[in-house]
Amino acid sequence: MQKIGILGGGQLGRMLLPAAANYPVETFVMENDKECPAAHLCHHFTEGNIRDFNDVYHFGKHLDALTIEIENVNIDALEALEKKILYRQSDTYVRICHHS
């Protein structure tokens, strides 16, 4: 079973999880609020700071794929993880969102 991670547990993360339930995947969500909208729908919840390099890197390093539901994440950690796992969002686009 593939392990799919979502950085951010807000409304978009919550909407992703029912769709993921139709596939043979195990879902992981990291967010700093353990009462966030996605926390109770995922298989595994990790309380952590999506802006912190170590939190993001350690959350993602054992996953098969990772996505974000908000652009305000640690880009350096995403770049490091991109060498190890499937990450489809371009770091360039996330950087542009950070500076808009």
Image: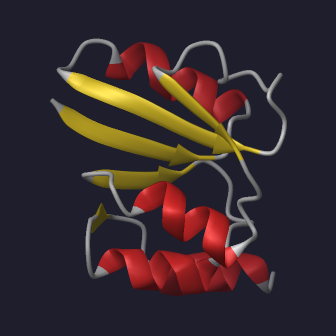
Left or right: 96 with respect to 18? right
Q: Position of residue 38 (x, y in %)?
A: 65, 24
Residue 21, quarter of picture: top left
Question: Which residue occupies 60% across, 80% down?
Answer: 75
Q: Position of residue 23 (x, y in %)?
A: 20, 19
Count of number-bearing discs: 0
| Residue 100, above or below 6 | below
Left or right: 6 with respect to 40?
Answer: left
Q: Is residue 51 above or below residue 42?
A: below
Q: Residue at x 29, y 39 (%)?
A: 3
At 25% across and 12% down in the image, what residue appears? Answer: 22
Q: Is residue 84 left or right of residue 76?
A: left
Structure colour scheme? secondary structure
Q: Percent x, y for residue 26?
A: 32, 27
Q: What quarter of the picture does the C terminus occupy? A: bottom right
User: Is 81 on the left-hand or right-hand side of 83?
Assistant: right
User: Which quarter of the picture shows residue 50?
Assistant: bottom right
Q: Is residue 21 above or below residue 88?
A: above
Most foreground residue, 47 or 51: 47
Tell me the residue at 75%/69% (across/down).
Answer: 51
Q: Nearer the viewer, residue 98 or 28?
A: 28
Q: Quadrant of the N terminus?
A: top left
